[in-house]
């Protein structure tokens, strides 16, 4: 990935690079950050803690130190909900720039999204299209298909647009160039208030990963 960034011709400051510290790295977080920097070789990175663990505050302190040293630009956390975030925030010096959680039409987690946003923290959705093994069924949802047809877009584009209109950043993963192009082509249409309500009604509290 570092090679792709270096060869892209895009100014480094215009690319937002996230990587994670995993709980098995929390005890040696500073070393893990240096290893990630060496592997990527792109000057600096944006870092996320992957999920809560007993020593996550210590690991986050290493990220804060890396920010002071210019190695990391911003800090973030992943898979933190209200009960994890409430005790965590008073223990850190730099407020996370974002919290990355599972969010999609079947698991909208709206109270948590609003809680995070009210803290002045950005929300980012992983598994925005449902996640491995679930994407096909979600994209075939008749409500999403109907809305997509009305806008001459795909169901995936409708979901990503829905997230953005809720103020949620998205990171859809794909190795398919056509899908990557489609995923970024969501700024030329807007969902109506009624369509947003229709998607909100799809909530099933159906979480697709344990985090």
Image: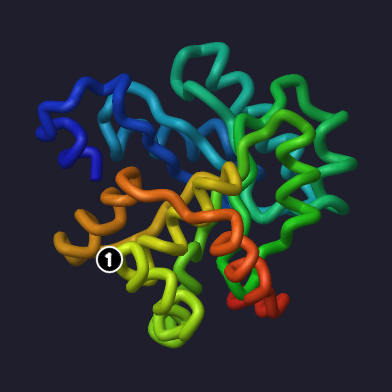
Any part of residue 139 in sight: yes
Is 8 displayed left or right of 119 in the figure? left
| Left or right position of 33 against 185 | right
Q: Secondary structure at mark 1?
A: loop
Question: Which image quadrant for residue 123?
Answer: top right
Q: Which residue is mark 1?
A: 152
| Residue that appears at 46% across and 63% down | 159
Of the pair 150 and 186, the residue shown nearer to us? 150
Horizontal and vertical percent position of residue 9: 11, 27
Q: Quadrant of the N terminus?
A: top left
Residue shown at 26%/30% (left/top)? Answer: 41
Q: Is the residue 123 above or below the residue 174 in the image?
A: above
Question: In the figure, 38 relative to 162: above or below?
Answer: above
Percent across and percent down for residue 88 are 82, 39
How far across and down, in percent of the image, does residue 81 sit? 77, 53
Instruction: Report crowding for label 1: few under 14, some 14 to 19, many 20 or more residues within 10 A (C-alpha).
Output: few
Q: Answer with left or right where residue 90 lies relative to residue 198.
A: right
The residue lying at 42 percent from left, 62 percent from top is 158
Residue at 20% x, 54% y is 181
Above or below — where is 27 with respect to 134? Answer: above
Q: Percent from the top left, x then y, of residue 197?
A: 64, 64
């Amino acid at each position: 990935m570092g090679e792709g960034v270096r060869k892209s011709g895009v100014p480094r400051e215009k690319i937002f690079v996230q990587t994670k510290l995993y709980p098995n790295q929390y005890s040696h977080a500073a070393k893990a950050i240096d290893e990630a920097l060496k592997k990527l070789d792109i000057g600096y990175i944006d870092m996320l803690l992957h999920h809560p663990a007993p020593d996550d505050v210590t690991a986050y302190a290493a990220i804060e130190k890396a920010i002071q040293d210019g190695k990391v630009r911003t800090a973030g956390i992943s898979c933190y909900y209200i009960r994890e975030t409430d005790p965590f925030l008073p223990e850190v010096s730099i407020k996370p720039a974002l919290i990355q959680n599972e969010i999609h039409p079947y698991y909208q987690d709206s109270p948590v999204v609003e809680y995070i946003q009210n803290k002045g923290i950005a929300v980012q959705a992983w598994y925005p299209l449902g996640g491995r093994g679930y994407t096909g069924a979600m994209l075939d949802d008749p409500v999403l298909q109907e809305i997509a047809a009305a806008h001459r877009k795909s169901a995936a584009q409708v979901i990503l647009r829905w997230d953005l209109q809720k103020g949620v950043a998205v990171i859809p993963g794909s190795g398919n160039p056509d899908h990557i192009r489609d995923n970024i082509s969501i700024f030329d249409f807007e969902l109506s208030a009624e369509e947003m309500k229709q998607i909100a009604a799809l909530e099933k509290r159906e979480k697709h990963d344990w985090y």
